[in-house]
Image (cartoon, helix red, strand yellow):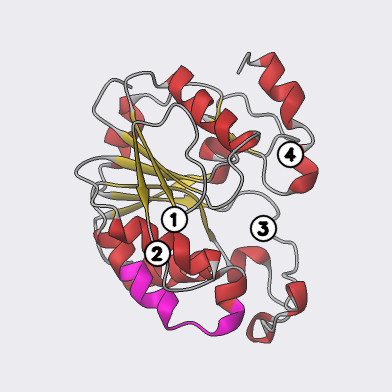
């Protein structure tokens, strides 16, 4: 992919380890891309980024802070918004974006669709979704989003700000993106790409995937061997 693209990365806290490796992996697979790092006023900036922006966040919630940073960042072209535990394994061709022909591409859940959602996760109350599956509750994942402007994030920020405290603690980004997708379901400016393609979990075959997603502490244990194999 040789077009002018930006990778936008948000992280607060220690940038050693997988965050720095994430930036290095993006640089290896996309040497001409612009890598932008968004963070708070005190976290370290990892080596390898082209630009960094610091923010004073209006909320202690990382869910809200990330969306706030995304909407404050004035993207001027095609931008991928990625979680720091997403690692590329092959270069995404321009034809993928042309195929979708959309200004916004969201990540559609593929794995564990039929698992029952834990409606009391981390002691929070999500009882409105009691007995529902993960795919019914959160069909859209926030780990990978593509957009040609930050308009989507201004709208998502408005949505997440109106959610209750439980969603500010966890899942707020997924809940807000789901509501945004519902609100824009009749628009031709939205498309979906499978989690298997852009955020494949490492315990599955990721042949044909463009990124592998080491989400959760248990999967990050697998990272050293992965980074060694891909010489990252």
> What SS does tag 2 mark?
loop
Front: mark 4 or 2: 2
- Look at mark 2 in the image and give the residue it sits on: 56
- Crowding at mark 1 (Cα within 10 Å: few <14, some 14-19, many 20+): few
Quarter of the image with the C terminus in it: top right
Q: Residue placed at 26% from the left, 47% from the top?
A: 102
Front: mark 3 or 2: 2
Majority secondary structure of magenta residues: helix
> What SS does tag 3 mark?
loop
Q: Residue placed at 63% from the left, 86% from the top?
A: 128
Q: Which of marks 4 and 3 is nearer the N terminus?
A: 3
- Check whether the beta carbons of the residues at disc 1 and disc 4 lie within 8 A of each other: no
Q: What stretch is highlighted in magenta?
A: 155-166
Q: Earlier in the sequence, mark 3 or mark 2?
A: 2
Q: Which numbered circle lies on residue 113?
A: 3
Cα–Cα gap, marks 4 and 2: 29 Å
Cα–Cα gap, marks 4 and 3: 22 Å
Cα–Cα gap, marks 3 and 2: 36 Å
- Crowding at mark 3 (Cα within 10 Å: few <14, some 14-19, many 20+): some
Q: Which numbered circle lies on residue 111?
A: none
- Look at mark 1 in the image and give the residue it sits on: 41
Image coordinates of residue 179 in percent, x first then y, are 42, 73
Cα–Cα gap, marks 3 and 1: 38 Å
Image vertical order of residue 48 relative to residue 188, above or below:
above
Front: mark 3 or 1: 1
- Check whether the beta carbons of the residues at disc 4 and disc 3 lie within 8 A of each other: no
Image vertical order of residue 67 relative to residue 218, above or below:
below
Q: Which of marks 3 and 1 is nearer the N terminus?
A: 1
- Crowding at mark 2 (Cα within 10 Å: few <14, some 14-19, many 20+): few
Cα–Cα gap, marks 1 and 2: 6 Å
Cα–Cα gap, marks 1 and 4: 26 Å
């Amino acid at each position: 992919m040789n077009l002018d693209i930006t990778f936008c990365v948000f992280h607060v806290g220690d940038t050693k380890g997988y965050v720095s490796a994430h930036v290095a992996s993006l640089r290896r697979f996309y040497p001409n891309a612009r890598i932008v790092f968004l963070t708070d006023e005190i976290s370290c900036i990892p080596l390898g980024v082209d630009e960094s922006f610091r923010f004073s966040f209006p909320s202690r919630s990382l869910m809200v802070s990330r969306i706030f940073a995304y909407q404050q960042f004035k993207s001027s072209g095609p931008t991928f918004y990625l979680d720091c535990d997403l690692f590329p394994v092959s270069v995404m061709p321009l034809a993928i974006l042309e195929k979708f022909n959309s200004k916004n591409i969201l990540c559609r859940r593929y794995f564990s669709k039929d698992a029952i959602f834990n409606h009391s996760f981390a002691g929070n109350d999500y009882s409105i979704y009691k007995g529902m599956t993960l795919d019914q509750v959160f069909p859209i994942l926030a780990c990978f989003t593509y957009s040609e402007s930050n308009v989507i994030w201004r709208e998502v920020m408005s949505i997440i700000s109106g959610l209750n405290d439980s969603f500010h603690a966890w899942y707020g980004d997924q809940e807000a993106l789901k509501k945004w997708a519902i609100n824009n379901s009749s628009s031709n400016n939205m498309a979906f790409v499978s989690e298997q393609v852009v955020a494949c979990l490492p315990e599955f075959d990721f042949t044909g995937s463009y990124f592998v997603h080491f989400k959760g502490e248990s999967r990050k244990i697998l990272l050293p061997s992965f980074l060694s194999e891909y010489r990252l």
